[in-house]
Image: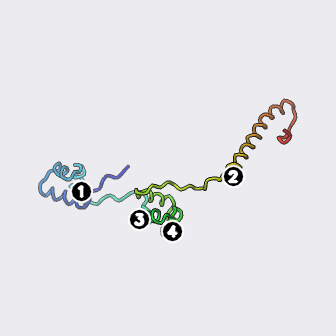
Amino acid sequence: MPKASQLSNEEVSKILHLKLLVKTVKEISKLLNRSRSMIYRVLTRKTPYEPKPGFGRPRETDIRSDGRIQRMASSQKMSIREITRGSRLQISKNTVHRRIKESGYMIHAKMARRLPLSKLHISKRLHWVRNLCHMVIIGWLSFPMMKKNGTSMDLKEI
């Protein structure tokens, strides 16, 4: 669930100042465009107002390193792996990819893990698959005949 919007110290001081000027909670909420419950919470709090601490795992990178990662990717045309190795932090490739996507002005897709196959390798793979299918079909066709005749035949004999 997302965190509720936080009040700044300036807004808290405005709320307290307006309450001293004998404004109602309804008037304060309209002036500051905040909910009445949030205004009540600030006014009835016994301790000084402090925003809630963040939750979840802390970020590995700060704003400065985010900018450095984005510059490496855009101006220096470095790959994600090169950026990961070149950064001073211990960060993963996914973190680097996430920071590049967060920049907004750059459109990146995940890089291919392998190079595409050459025409020679494609033809060899197709040849291998055809031979395999041929052997399987012959094996399936000859299997019922072998059972009927009661003989055993190798695929090499066929």
Crowding near pointer 4: few (<14 within 10 Å), some, many (20+)? few
The residue labelled by disc 2 is 120
Q: Tell me the residue that label 1 is attached to.
A: 45
- Residues at circles 3 and 2 in contact by the CB criterion of under 8 Å: no
Q: Earlier in the sequence, mark 3 or mark 2?
A: 3
Label 2 vs label 4, nearer the camera: 2
Circle 2: is it few (<14), some (14-19), or many (20+) Cα within 10 Å?
few
> Disc 4 vs disc 1: which is toward the camera?
4
- Taking the spot 34% from the left edge, 52% from the top edge, the residue there is 3
Q: Which residue is mark 4?
A: 86
Three-letter residue code for mark 2 = Leu
**Residue 23, position in %: x, y?**
13, 53
**What type is the residue that disc 1 sits on?**
Arg
Front of the two marks 3 and 1: 3
For mark 3, what is the residue? 67
Q: Residue lying farthest left?
A: 22
Amino acid at pointer 3: Gly
> Could you give the CA–CA distance between mark 2 and mark 4, rounded to whole angstroms?
36 Å
| Residue 154 against residue 36 in the figure, above or below | above
